[in-house]
Image (cartoon, rainbow, N blue to C red):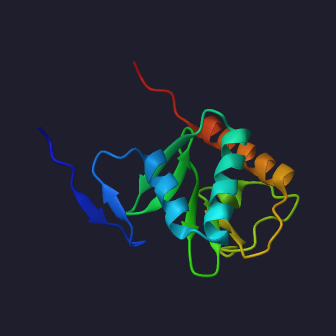
């Protein structure tokens, strides 16, 4: 019988071996217990609405990651921000100007949400769908 082990992640919470990524994200939202948890939960919900086929992952010792044919985005939490980093954000059109962080990079772009910020849900869902479409268009078919 396998005994469950726990390890500390970089966010300071305990991870139990065998917990699913979704359970770990649930735990992170609960442990934050403030506007950051509420914002992360809201962003997560919008990602799932925009792409019902999204796969949740837990990487780099404590970072929620959403994938579909590759990484769509991450959901990092900091003292003063919830950062949603799009893996291929520099290649995405952003007509609503949501990207407000990591603007100098050649690949990634991010949106920093601060306490009290209003989320443009329609624009965010459109950006998520565009990221999925880009991932799917770049996915190489497997050779037989």
Front position in the image: 3 or 87: 3
Q: Does the rendering let one see residue 133?
A: yes
Front position in the image: 105 or 18: 18
Front position in the image: 88 or 39: 39
Q: Position of residue 80 (x, y in %)?
A: 64, 81
Q: Position of residue 19 (x, y in %)?
A: 35, 47
Q: Position of residue 48 (x, y in %)?
A: 66, 41
Residue furthest to the top: 144
Q: Say which residue appears at 62% left-offset and 36% top-offset.
A: 136
Q: Quadrant of the C terminus?
A: top left
Total marks drawn? 0
Q: Say which residue appears at 65% left-offset and 34% top-offset.
A: 52
Q: Quadrant of residue 12?
A: bottom left
Q: Say which residue appears at 64% left-offset and 51% top-offset.
A: 44
Give the answer, above or below, for where 80 lies relative to 6. below
Asked whether, in this view, residue 8 is left or right of residue 88, the answer is left
Q: Say which residue appears at 66% left-offset and 65% top-offset.
A: 109
Give the answer, above or below, for where 80 lies relative to 22. below
Q: Position of residue 129 (x, y in %)?
A: 73, 42
Residue furthest to the left: 1
Q: Does the rendering let one see residue 106?
A: no
């Amino acid at each position: 019988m396998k005994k469950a082990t726990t390890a500390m992640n970089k966010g300071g919470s305990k991870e139990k071996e065998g917990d699913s990524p979704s359970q770990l994200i649930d735990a992170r939202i609960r442990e934050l217990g403030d506007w950051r948890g509420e914002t992360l939960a809201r962003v997560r919900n919008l990602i799932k609405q925009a792409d019902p086929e999204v796969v949740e992952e837990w990487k780099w010792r404590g970072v929620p990651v959403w994938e579909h044919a590759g990484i769509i985005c991450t959901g990092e939490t900091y003292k003063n921000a919830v950062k949603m980093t799009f893996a291929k954000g520099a290649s995405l059109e952003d007509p609503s100007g949501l990207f407000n962080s990591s603007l100098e990079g050649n690949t990634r772009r991010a949106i920093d949400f601060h306490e009290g910020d209003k989320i443009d849900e329609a624009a965010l869902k459109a950006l998520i769908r565009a990221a999925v479409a880009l991932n799917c268009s770049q996915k190489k078919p497997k050779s037989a």
